[in-house]
Each structure stands twice: as C-alpha cells, then as structure tokens.
Image (cartoon, helix red, strand yellow):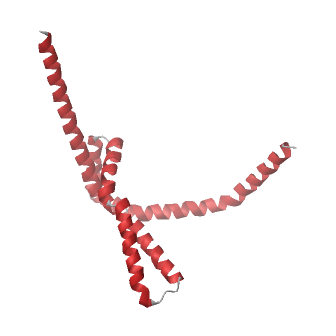
Amino acid sequence: MSRFRVLCAASLLLCASGQALADAASHAAAAEKFLQVVRADKLTVPVYAQVQQMFAQRFAEAKAPQSKQSLLERYQARANTALDKAVSWDRLKPDMVRLYTSTFNESEMKELLVFYQSSLGQKVLQSMPALTAQSAQMTQAALEKAVPEVNRLLDEMQKELGGTKK
C-alpha cells in the first residue's frame, strides 16, 4: 500500500511541475508579447545614435579632412559591432523577460498588454519619451534654484564642524 502512496505522490508532483512549467512558459510569452508591443527592442537606439555622434564629434574636433570620412565610418561600424555584442536585443531580451515576469504576474502582464495595445496606451508610448525629457528639464531647472542655498548650508555646516574640532 505504501508503494501506491509514493507512486500517487510522485504522479501528483509530476503533474504539478508540468503545470508550473506551462504556467512559466505562458507567463514568459506574455512578457515577450508586452516587450514587443512597447517596442523594448528599440530602447538602445538612442545609445547607438549617441555613440555615432561621439565619433563624429571627435572626427570634427580632429579637423579631419573629408577624405578621411571612410575612416570615421569604419570606426562607427566597429563601435556598432561592440554595442551589438553588449546591448543587442537578443542579448537583453532574456533578462528583460525575467525582469518583467518577476515584477508582474501573468494576469498583470495581460492587463498591461490590453492597455498598451489600446489607442491610449499607444499614445502613452509615443508621448512618454518627450514627457520624460521635459520633466527632467523642469526638475533640473527647479533644482538649480536651490543650489546656492544648499551650497550655503554646506559651507555653514562645514564651519560648524570645523569649530567643534578645536
């Protein structure tokens, strides 16, 4: 009789682990679909553009003649290859899927998909980069107003600390 119980328990565990694997695969598939909808594969495009700009700027600063343009292009291509090795979507995708599946359960992933596939969700995706940049600029401008006071307070504290060390 005890063999029967062990066999039943093993069967239950096998079935449960199979369901867990199916759930994990479904969860990962939902995360992949979400990342596709939000165009996560395009997140590194600005990085590539910035690196290309850095090479072009260095080329201009060197006052390189136009006849050396092919040299610039060759180095830009090599930089792209280096970036591909580090931040290509194929390299980032597994970690991004893990990040999103560890943050959102499958049901939440599906809700996010519904939202981001909606017209409002698409508007959010299109507007967010500009909104984020503008928000950062506004915050930076507001912080600049506080810098003199913060610096004054730092100096004041330093004087007090210096006065207590005597």
Left or right: residue 112 compared with residue 158: left
Quadrant in which the N terminus appears: top left
Relative to 10, does residue 103 appear above or below in the rendering? Answer: below
Asked where in the image residue 22 lies, by quadrant, the reply is top left
Asked where in the image residue 118 lies, by quadrant, the reply is bottom left
Quadrant in which the C terminus appears: top right
Q: Residue at x 18, y 33 (%)?
A: 19
Q: Looking at this view, is 34 or 112 the one in front?
A: 34
Asked where in the image residue 87 lies, by quadrant, the reply is bottom left
Q: Residue furthest top?
A: 1
Left or right: residue 6 compared with residue 62: left
Left or right: residue 58 compared with residue 37: right
Q: Residue 81: x and y, percent?
A: 35, 68
Q: Residue 78: x and y, percent?
A: 38, 72
Q: Looking at this view, is 4 or 155 the one in front?
A: 4
Q: Residue at x 52, y 86 (%)?
A: 63
Relative to 94, does residue 23 appear above or below in the rendering? Answer: above
Q: Residue at x 49, y 86 (%)?
A: 64
Q: Is residue 58 visible?
A: yes
Relative to 134, does residue 65 appear above or below in the rendering? Answer: below
| Number of numbered tags placed on the structure image | 0
Q: Residue 12: x and y, percent?
A: 16, 24
Q: Residue at x 38, y 65 (%)?
A: 83
Q: Is residue 38 visible?
A: no
Q: Residue 133: x and y, percent?
A: 47, 64
